[in-house]
Image: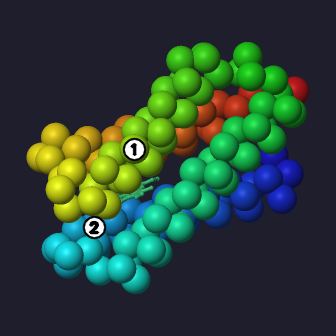
Amino acid sequence: MSTVLSSKVAYAGIGFLLTLISGVVLSKMGRPLNSAVFGAHKIIAVGTIVLIGLNIRDLAQVVGLQAVHPALIWGTGLLLLALVVSGSLLSFDKLVLPLTLRVHQIVPLLALAFSALSIYLLANGRS
Ligand code: HEM
């Protein structure tokens, strides 16, 4: 993996960590949501999702997508989408349901596992 690509992977990892931390801080601060922490959580989350997508695209261009089972790529995309949808629902006080919150608490760990595995397999695939 090139240095440019490996630093992009590192940025995605740091972004994911910051998203998790800002999410937990936001949750602990309670409602009404703290707008500064909420804004930071959203921006870092969206930036991280874009970085994960770019990493997968760039690595797939080098080794080809066949290095990873399609279910893993689709799973990563769907889990990240579920985070944006559940996060958007949680942004509105009237739409906060226990299920939505539970989804937004569990899916981050699954999304981390899926995206890290996809990137790992692509980074170790043969060109
Ligand atoms: C990579 C994407 C994301 C990850 C990994 C993530 C992760 C988290 C985590 C771990 C929490 C704390 C949950 C808890 O401990 O109860 C949280 C809370 C929250 N997130 Fe996200 N999030 C992401 C994207 C988003 C987006 C895009 C939005 C909004 C559009 C959003 C809105 C929220 C809100 C409103 C809360 C507070 C929920 C509450 O406690 O009422 N999140 N997030």
Can you identify the residue that label 1 sits on?
85
Mark 1 element type: helix
Please identify, in this view, whether the residue under mark 1 or under mark 2 is nearer the observer. Answer: 1
- Ligand 1 occupies quarter: bottom left
N-terminal of the pair, mark 1 or mark 2, is: 2
Q: x, y (%) of residue 50?
A: 64, 52
- Image disc number at residue 20: none
Q: Amino acid at mark 1?
A: Val
Whether the residue carrying mark 1 lies under 8 Å from ligand 1 is answered with: no
Check the image and report above or below for 115 versus 27.
above
Q: Quadrant of residue 125?
A: top right
Relative placement, left or right, of 118 versus 92 is right
Q: Quadrant of residue 48?
A: bottom right
Q: Which residue is at a point 85% across and 32% down the rendered structure image?
A: 61
Q: Nearer the viewer, residue 77 or 127?
A: 77
Residue at far front of view: 94
Q: Is residue 13 visible?
A: no
Q: x, y (%) of residue 15?
A: 54, 64
- Quadrant including the C terminus: top right
Q: Nearer the viewer, residue 54 or 13?
A: 54
Q: Is residue 95 visible?
A: yes
Q: CA distance from mark 1 to mark 2?
A: 18 Å
Q: Amino acid at mark 2?
A: Val
Whether the residue carrying mark 2 lies under 8 Å from ligand 1 is answered with: yes
Q: Quadrant of residue 27?
A: bottom left
Q: x, y (%) of residue 39?
A: 44, 74
Relative placement, left or right, of 26 versus 6 is left
How many discs mark residues in the rendered view? 2
Check the image and report above or below for 120 versus 108.
above
Q: x, y (%) of residue 72?
A: 54, 24
Can you identify the residue that label 2 sits on?
24
